[in-house]
Image (cartoon, rainbow, N blue to C red):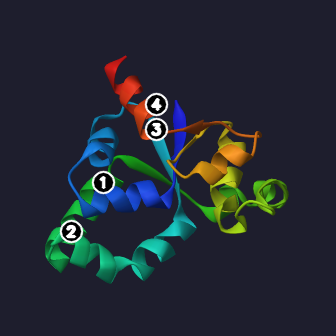
Amino acid sequence: MNIVIDTNRFISALIKEGTTREIIVKSNDTLLFPEIEFQEISKYKDEILEKSGLSEVEFNILLSNLLTKVRIIKTDQIISFKDKADRIMEKIDLDDSIFVATALAFNCPIWSDDNHFKQQNEVGVMTNSDMLRRLDD
């Protein structure tokens, strides 16, 4: 099953060894991550390094390892869904419309613990708990 992973989940996996990282590593699902969201990871890299206690080298190794478990989605694969996603998210959080566009393009849910995704009803939303249950199946 395809599942879009939001940036907060991905950053969480970079910061600490915990549930989110375990889900990414052990999941049999195809986790989709919009390429453009690497800008967010770069933007918060210093904060991630500080919170995680990782060195730059350790961070790069971890990032590379996690990326082997994630399919990067190029913008041109989802751009035709961006206008619809913007309409869906315009009164919720327009910054997150890229995840909705990706979910629409691949007809799949978004993995996020951000409640604002639940304010729309066009794409499904899965929490960490939902993802953990999938690991047990």
Between tags 1 and 2, which lies in front? Answer: 2
Q: Give yes or no for contact between labels 4 and 2 (Cβ–Cβ under 8 Å).
A: no
Q: Secondary structure at mark 4?
A: helix
Q: Position of residue 119 (x, y in %)?
A: 72, 47
Q: Amino acid at mark 1?
A: Leu
Dot 3 alpha-carbon crowd within 10 angstroms: few under 14, some 14 to 19, many 20 or more: some
CA separation in Å, label 3 and label 4: 15 Å
Q: Give yes or no for contact between labels 1 and 3 (Cβ–Cβ under 8 Å).
A: no
Would you name the residue on which mark 3 appears?
30
Would you name the residue on which mark 4 appears?
130
Labels 3 and 4: the sequence-earlier one: 3
| Residue name at image x 37 percent, y 62 percent | 11
Disc sitting over residue 52 in the figure: 2
Q: Amino acid at mark 2?
A: Ser
Would you name the residue on which mark 1 appears?
66
The reply, left or right, for residue 50 in relation to residue 80 is left
| Residue name at image x 14 percent, y 77 percent | 55
CA separation in Å, label 1 and label 4: 20 Å
The reply, left or right, for residue 123 in relation to residue 128 is right
Between tags 3 and 4, which lies in front? Answer: 4
Q: Give yes or no for contact between labels 1 and 2 (Cβ–Cβ under 8 Å).
A: no
Dot 4 alpha-carbon crowd within 10 angstroms: few under 14, some 14 to 19, many 20 or more: few
Disc sitting over residue 97 in the figure: none
Work out whether 16 lies above or below 31: below
CA separation in Å, label 3 and label 2: 26 Å
Q: Secondary structure at mark 2?
A: helix
Q: Give yes or no for contact between labels 3 and 2 (Cβ–Cβ under 8 Å).
A: no
Work out whether 73 lies above or below 136: below
